[in-house]
Amino acid sequence: MNDNFYPSVTWGVPVSDSNVPQLSSIHRDQSFTTWLVAIHQGSGETLVLQTVRWRMQLRIHVDPDKPLGQRARLCEPVAQEQPQVLGKNEPIPPNAMVKPNANDAQVLMWRPKSGEPIVVIPPKY
């Protein structure tokens, strides 16, 4: 299973017919809880072996007019917090074991500086 974190963004306004790049910054702050589990194939019983919490934060300044390789600059944080392996395992919430999972529940929103937010890509589920 490949469950790597790899976010992506668009250069242009996703709800516009224009191809002019207008991305000026990226702000992201996400927290995750991940469980390492063993599942008994006969009974279906789930045993939590380890609970890990981590957070990904970043702020990037973007200038699409600069040359390739110079368009983006990491503002903060320079170093990410390290994942925390919890000393005491937490139970997996029942809703985490059924759809929609995190990927199917994601929504892409366009939030302009003025005006109402627009759903660009609705959840799959």
Image: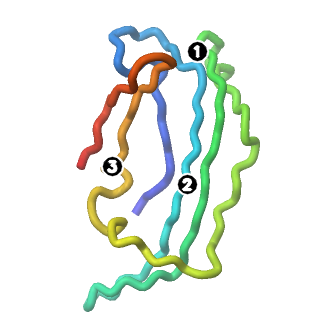
18 or 94: which is nearer to us? 94
Binning the other alpha carbons within 10 Å of mark 3 as few (below 14), some (14 to 19) or many (20 upward) gives: few
Q: Which residue is mark 2?
A: 31
Q: Amino acid at mark 3?
A: Ala
Disc 1 residue type (three-letter): Pro
Q: Which mark is residue 46?
A: none
Q: What residue would you read off at disc 3? A: 105
Q: Quadrant of residue 102?
A: bottom left
**Near-viewer residue (101 or 39):** 101
* Image height of 55 relative to 14, above or below: below
**Can you tell which quarter of the image residue 2 is in?**
bottom left
Please tell me whether residue 123 is drawn above or below residue 46 in the rendered image. Answer: above
What amino acid does circle 2 point to?
Ser
Disc 1/disc 3 C-alpha distance (Å): 30 Å
Q: Which residue is mark 1?
A: 64
Give how far apart the Cα atoms at labels 1 and 2 are.
29 Å
Residue at the spot 29% in from the left edge and 56% down from the top edge: 100
